Amino acid sequence: HSSTLVTAGVYLLIRFNLLLSDTMFFKLLLLFSSLTMFMAGISANYEFDLKKIIALSTLSQLGLMMSILSMGMPLLAFFHLLTHAMFKALLFMCAGVIIHMMNDMQDIRFMGGISLYVPMTCLCMNISNMALCGIPFLAGFYSKDLILEMVSFSNLNFLIFFLYYVSTGLTMFYTIRLMMYLMVNDFNLMCIYNLYDEDYVMLKSMLVLLFMSVVSGSMLMWLIFYYPCM
């Protein structure tokens, strides 16, 4: 899968960090990854395809990992790589269940009010979305808050600061927009007979990832950063 290969590319750059640090490559990488994060966030806010929204969200988070790596913080990039894997896998599973129940319909404009019919799937999706936004004490909070803190203390120009904080705000915007379209809008009755929450194999897998999306941030922080300074 292309997302797996891209994530493997981030891990490869983390492993070769010592060879590439203090080179012009990392300076260019910081600029392009920050722009990628920003443009992916804007694109996700104007998209109506559920899979494309999540794919653009993944692209935005990969830009975040690459940018913090190019600033010379490979451990922090790896930390966000691990926490992001937990809640983004849960988000993709929830999206797959919803698309399957909607007879392969991916347009979020036809998915309103599904929380009444698939409450457990919507619960898992909301938790993963909140972790993506960095809501306190979920997995995404520990890595994103630390990344923004280190960016604030770094000697960067105004453009990088602007791209970082606006991209973080765009993540909140497209996540809230997605939740509003899925949970609040009027439901299209075309596929009502297909909506049920009884795929126990998927539910058990999603609940395991839900647990990890809540606790993995604090657990991994103790394992990776075993001393206070970076």
Image (tube, helix red, strand yellow):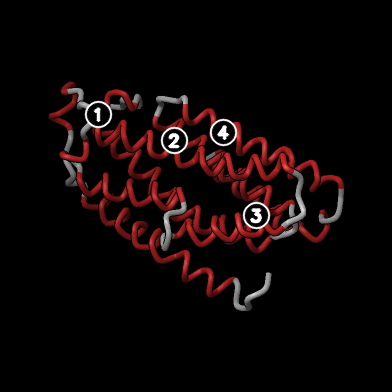
75 left or right, relative to 130: right
Mark 1 neighbour class, 10 Å CA radius: few under 14, some 14 to 19, many 20 or more: some
Amino acid at pointer 4: Ala
Mark 2 neighbour class, 10 Å CA radius: few under 14, some 14 to 19, many 20 or more: many
| Secondary element at image label 2 | helix
Q: CA distance from mark 2 to mark 4?
A: 11 Å
Residue furthest to the front: 158
Residue 185 tag number: 1
Mark 1 and mark 3 lie on one chain; the one further toward the N terminus is 3
Amino acid at pointer 2: Tyr
Q: CA distance from mark 1 to mark 3?
A: 39 Å
Quarter of the image for residue 107 reads: top left
Mark 4 and mark 3 lie on one chain; the one further toward the N terminus is 3
Mark 3 neighbour class, 10 Å CA radius: few under 14, some 14 to 19, many 20 or more: some
Mark 1 and mark 4 lie on one chain; the one further toward the N terminus is 4
Q: Which residue is mark 3?
A: 11
Q: Nearer the viewer, residue 192 or 33?
A: 33
Residue 39 screen position, x and y as percent: 60, 31
Circles 1 and 4, Cβ within 8 Å, touching? The answer is: no
Q: Split into 4 quadrants, where in the image is the C terminus? A: bottom right
Residue 116 screen position, x and y as percent: 16, 39
Q: CA distance from mark 4 to mark 3?
A: 21 Å
Amino acid at pointer 1: Asn
Circles 2 and 4, Cβ within 8 Å, touching? The answer is: no
Q: Which residue is mark 2?
A: 174
| Secondary element at image label 4 | helix
Residue 98 screen position, x and y as percent: 28, 36
Mark 3 and mark 2 lie on one chain; the one further toward the N terminus is 3
